[in-house]
Image (cartoon, rainbow, N blue to C red):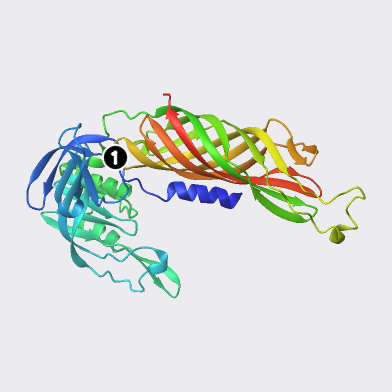
Amino acid sequence: MKNKLLLCLWILTSVSAFAQKHYEKGHIVTVGNKNFKGYLLHEDLFHTPTEFYFKQQLTDKRKTVSAEEVKTVVINPNLKYERHTVKIDLFNNQNKTLSNSRISNFLPHSLLLKVLLEGDITLLSYETSKIKRFFVKKDNKIIPLEYKKYIIDNKIHYNLNYQKQLRESFACQLQDRETPSYSEKKLVNYFKKYAKCHDLRITDLTAIKVNKVRKGTFNLRAKVGVSNSTFYTDIWGRIDSQNSAANVQYGVEFEYVFSYNNHRFSIFVEPTILMRRNTSVTSPIDLEHFQYIIPPDFEDFDYREFSYRGYEIPIGLRNYWYTSDKSAITLHGGILFNIPSGDFIRYRDDHSTSFATSNQTSMFAGIGYDYYKVFSIEFRYNFKRNLVVRTLESFQYSDVSLRLGINIL
């Protein structure tokens, strides 16, 4: 179960959203010096964006602008990007591909840099999934703060030359020989102290908060689905599996979408009523092989039907990939609680046998499509879980389902 849980968490956390849903006033200046004013998507991104989403009016369809076309982007009140040609070592910091040289290979590149501090001295950053670099602009000259991770004899080393640069070129008595780590927060604080020490005017864009209050949203959906189950039986050492006919299930979903990261993540619970029925026939077992453990009155079994009723209560996380302002691809996964409402029944010829079932948990994962506040449709896989476990008999099942949700709230 641990591996299944890790799989679900990896699916939900290893992907990036296409877009998000919070627009702010701003403008774009292209490399051709064309100026476009309107509204831009205010994204909570950790990396330098490769594209921007722009509208002249909030009611317009959005336009996508490639970062390669951009000279300057301003998104009120606290995001700004500027294109500069800087010297940078683009060798990544991932351990598997580290360089064996301590010396940085600085080459000129035209890059879109994020403005962290702006004024008489400017702190800039460039970040991708593989690298993170900082630059200081002073007197119209941009200086790369040198930092490099490298490997020699299977041991990781660090070129921390940026600390020497800070001591020699950006020193201040107020900092008491402070040596900040190579991170946005520490470097921003360092240069704010430096500006105060030398009476320089700066604006800390990282400290400006978005005025609009972002609230989480609540969704209530009626759910109906069609599922196909697979029963797994292990009876007296004979392992078999059978697929069931389609089963209809009904439920209701309660979902809370967090405001964090522009409504990309939610938690939900979905109580569901279900009935599983299987009508496949199992072939006889080898009686001779089991002659020492089979009771005298045991006959060749030919089980014609299995039946199980109960409730499912999935509790999980959902990740939204917004493809437009009102639609999104979703990934979800979590823990599934199974609560039986009766016994597990095995039908055979003219009689039946009931087995007491117990509460069981398993994992689930799925993918879907959501049209904002209207409907959703999801494909879900529920991993194998136990129904009955006895000394010489066990019954398990898994299922796949297609679920339609209609928003009530």
Q: Is residue 281 left or right of residue 195?
A: right
Residue at 62% x, 44% y is 244
Q: Identify which residue, 151 or 217, lies in the foreground.
A: 217
Q: Residues within 10 Å of mark 1 (few under 14, many from 20)?
A: some
On the image, the x and y values in percent for residue 312 come to 60, 34
Q: Is residue 72 left or right of residue 343?
A: left
Q: Is residue 340 visible?
A: yes
Residue at 37% x, 33% y is 259
- Where residue 283 sits, quadrant-wise, is bottom right
Quadrant in the picture for the C terminus: top left
As drawn, the residue found furthest toward the left would be 33
Residue at 79% x, 45% y is 390
As drawn, the residue found furthest toward the right would be 296
The relative height of residue 268 versus residue 190 in the rendered view (above or below) is above
**Number of numbered discs present?**
1
Q: Identify which residue, 121 or 175, lies in the foreground.
A: 121
On the image, the x and y values in percent for residue 106 come to 22, 68
- Where residue 133 sits, quadrant-wise, is bottom left
As drawn, the residue found furthest toward the front would be 350
The relative height of residue 301 versus residue 286 in the rendered view (above or below) is above
Asked which secondary structure carries label 1, the reply is loop
The relative height of residue 289 versus residue 371 in the rendered view (above or below) is below
- Where residue 323 sits, quadrant-wise, is top left
On the image, the x and y values in percent for residue 36 come to 11, 41
Residue indicated by mark 1: 324
**Type of amino acid under label 1:** Ser
As drawn, the residue found furthest toward the bottom would be 153
